[in-house]
Image (tube, grey):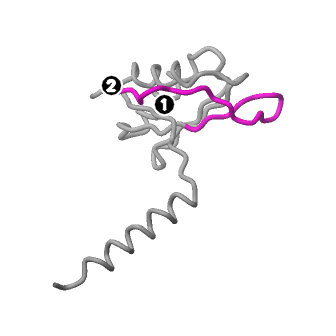
Amino acid sequence: MSTSIAPAPRSIATGPGAGGEAHLTLEITGMTCASCVRRVERALADVPGVTAAAVNLAAESADVTLSRPADAGPLIAAVADAGYQAAVPAVVRADDVARRRAAQAASYAGAGPS
């Protein structure tokens, strides 16, 4: 399995949950079964500051609860060390999607029959 790591992990500045905890969702790829899920959960749970980790095989994601905001790098590295890939999901803004769709529609309109 490839152990590529997402480029430039950034700090987690998520809003605090109950008790001042921080939450982060990671995209996890490379899992194929419940054993993989358990392996990723254990790897994340072993990272200092992690209070809980729940991995969803179907959604290919992990919801990580931290005792305080922290850097995503150690979490991504722990998943990579377990043999899987992790990344902080990209944030897609609605106006970016609308702009992309408009550009795509314009390119289709200009590509009519010759």
Question: Which quadrant does the C terminus fall into?
Answer: bottom left
Residue of label 1? 38
Is 81 magenta? The answer is no
Kindly identify the residue that appears in the image at 39 percent across and 26 percent down.
5
What is the three-letter code of the residue carrying label 2?
Thr
In this image, 50 relative to 27: left or right?
right
The residue that mark 2 highlights is 3
**Front of the two marks 2 and 1:** 2
Question: Helix or strand or loop: what does disc 2 sit on?
Answer: loop
- Residue 9 location (% of width, % of height): 50, 26
Q: Is residue 19 magenta?
A: yes
Q: Residue 111 occupies which quadrant of the picture?
A: bottom left
Residue placed most toward the observer, 38 or 66: 66
Residue at horizontal 44 percent and vertical 37 percent from the top = 28
For disc 1, the neighbor class at 10 Å (few under 14, some 14 to 19, many from 20) is some
Q: Is residue 63 left or right of residue 38?
A: right
Is 75 displayed left or right of 28 in the figure?
Answer: right
Q: Which of the two residues, 65 or 33, is positioned nearer the viewer here?
A: 65
Instruction: Give residue 73's mark.
Output: none
Q: Which residues are magenta?
A: 4-25
